[in-house]
Image (spheres, helix red, strand yellow):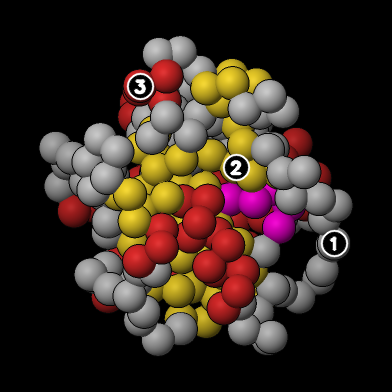
Amino acid sequence: MPFTIALGALFSMFLWGGKSEPSKSRVIGIQPFEGIPEAHVDETKAALERYYHYTVRVLPERKLPEGAFTNVKSPRYRADKLLRFLEEILPDDCDHLLGLTASDISTTKYEDFETKRIKEPAWKYEDWGIFGLGQMPGRACVVSTFRLKGGVDEAKLRERLRKVACHEIGHNLGLPHCAKSEKCFMRDGAEKIATVDAESEVLCEHCAATIGVAVR
């Protein structure tokens, strides 16, 4: 049974999927959802190609699935439902699919996933806004720029986008949150945007060795 571990109101999360399947040559698909600027899609594609050295394909734009919409505290899309949608539409020639949206996304942050006990205060964590969600390991992840853009210029937004996209694909490849280095982009965000800003755009040696990529 999958479970989620929260990183915070503004940060990515991962969803436990199962046993990873190493692959020397992978293809990552990017599924742009309506409203995401083409420049942000291109930035994500270039970052994944540059860091992981995998083939990255951009799929035709789609509308966000209506079934994922929620309005508990504000209009958002449930990230867990988006992951299921992405799994359903995953092309046969792609190993992973990253959904990219400018809309706000959310999930529920649990104190105990097995018992589904919501972290207190429940009103805050029942519909918890996040940057991204990814299966670990798995085939689907989703990233939102909605919470990346507040109070920063375009260059900083793109830097954050690169880090979060590489972070979520890292979960797909089997990486948990990193406790080895404060600079590793797999670090747990700990509910602070400053954590993402303090990270570098590389994996630490431990995480890089775990999935067999060069530290760059």
Q: CA distance from mark 3 to mark 2?
A: 21 Å
Could you tell me the amino acid type at mark 3? Trp
Q: Amino acid at mark 2?
A: Phe
Magenta-tinted stretch: 134-138
Q: Nearer the viewer, mark 3 or mark 1?
A: 3
Report the disc number at residue 199. Answer: none
SS of the residue under disc 2: strand
Q: Nearer the viewer, residue 214 or 61?
A: 61
Among the two numbered marks 3 and 1 on one chain, the one whose residue lies closer to the N terminus: 1
**Residue found 46% across the figure and 83% down from its top:** 59
> Which label sits in the foreground, 3 or 2?
3
Q: Where is residue 212 shown, x and y percent of the image? A: 79, 54
Q: Is residue 115 magenta?
A: no
Residue in the picture at 35% in, 22% down: 124
54 and 101: which is toward the camera: 101
Q: Nearer the viewer, mark 2 or mark 1?
A: 2
Residue 123's disc number: 3
Crowd tier of the residue under label 1, counting other residues whose Cα lies within 10 Å: few below 14, some 14–19, many 20 or above? few
Which residue is pictured at 62% across the width and 37% down the height? 4
Q: Residues within 10 Å of mark 2 (few under 14, many from 20)?
A: many
